[in-house]
Amino acid sequence: MTKVLTIGEVLVEIVATKKGNGFREPVPLIGPFPSGAPAIFIDQVGKLGVSAAIISRVGDDDFGHVNLDRLRADGVDISGIEVDPQGTTGSAFVRYREDGSRAFVFNIRHSACGTISLTFENRKTIETCTHLHVMGTALYAPSVVETVMAALDSVKARGGTVSFDPNLRPEIMNSPGMREALSTVLARTDLFLPSGEELFLFTTAKEERAAIDELLGTGIEAIVVKRGAAGARYYDAARSLTHPGFAVEELDPTGAGDSFGAAFVSFWLNGSAPAEALTYAAAAGARAVTKIGPMEGTSNRAELDALIEGAGPIAIAGQ
């Protein structure tokens, strides 16, 4: 049976309700919302009924239990989340600027999830999983990188598969060993899920088709380039498909890419045709932005079906 694993930060997100540039004056806030890119991803996998697990650490505090309660309720195996009685759960404060971009203040590296390590219990969790999803945001500390690499070795040695979403933010690009870890993961990736310009982080080519050919030539089976509200494009050695996306009212884009990736991975692992996987992924990403809070818009199958049916026929170029 397929079981999807991810590793990395579990945190809460606190959102400023007034637009502006950062947090240098008092602003009204809402939250805490359960968050963390790996946590959002795995929550969406669990809500689609796919067996799912996550390795992380939280503090024995309200912020930690907000996440544990949500993930458990949505069907995620949380046995790999260690609760540190002396630790503090990670956090992210986010404020939207007038141009739609975001300013973040993160507490990850020095929080409980900054000390994820390769424990005996974590090894047991890894051994139950057949697919590993790696997110670039998770490669923020040496001990976390060690855990990801051990899981990568274990899953691949047992014939499993790996998906990789760079999901990079400028705030973490200078973390020790980050660039080396990203390249190591890419070399063993089956499904690559970059957003926009992330496609070119690992290629000499600077034009999309040439970059795709370069990456497919390394042994990657399939690539999905996420384009936000503009949809997404799928590539493999035999075809390319473009989904234009679904028109929705955007309230909060945080977590949309994670939800998109989780839905695509879930359907891809289930043997769905690329067009079907792309459609459900686009629906998951679209629905995610209609809710305030990064994990509030994760969806079950019925909710995605309703969005797809309500949108009417959508042409997928390349079919």
Image: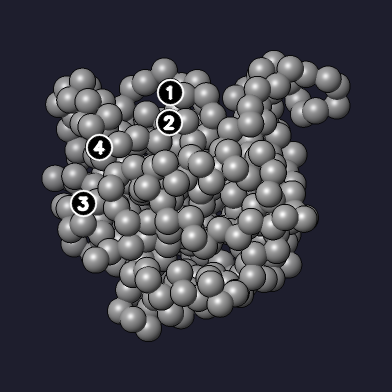
Left or right, 129 with reference to 49:
right
Specify whether residue 163 is in view: no
Within 10 Å of the Cα at label 3, are there few (<14), some (14-19), or many (20+) other Cα atoms?
Answer: many
Q: CA distance from mark 4 to mark 3?
A: 17 Å
Q: CB under 8 Å between callouts 1 and 4?
A: no
- Image coordinates of residue 196 in percent, x first then y, are 47, 45
Image coords of residue 304 (percent x, y): 26, 32
Q: Position of residue 40 (x, y in %)?
A: 48, 44
Label 3 residue SS:
helix
Dot 4 amino acid type: Arg
Q: Which residue is mark 4?
A: 301
Q: Which residue is mark 3?
A: 274
Is mark 2 in CB contact (under 8 Å) with mark 3?
no
- Say whether marks 1 and 2 touch (CB < 8 Å): yes
State the CA–CA distance, disc 3 to disc 1. Answer: 25 Å
- Whether residue 82 is situated above or below residue 11 in the rendered picture: below
Left or right of 31: which side holds 295? left
Left or right, 182 with respect to 310, comes to: right
Q: From the image, state whether disc 3 or disc 1 is nearer to you.
A: 1
Between disc 2 and disc 3, the foreground one is: 2
Image disc number at residue 297: 2
Element on which disc 4 rests: helix
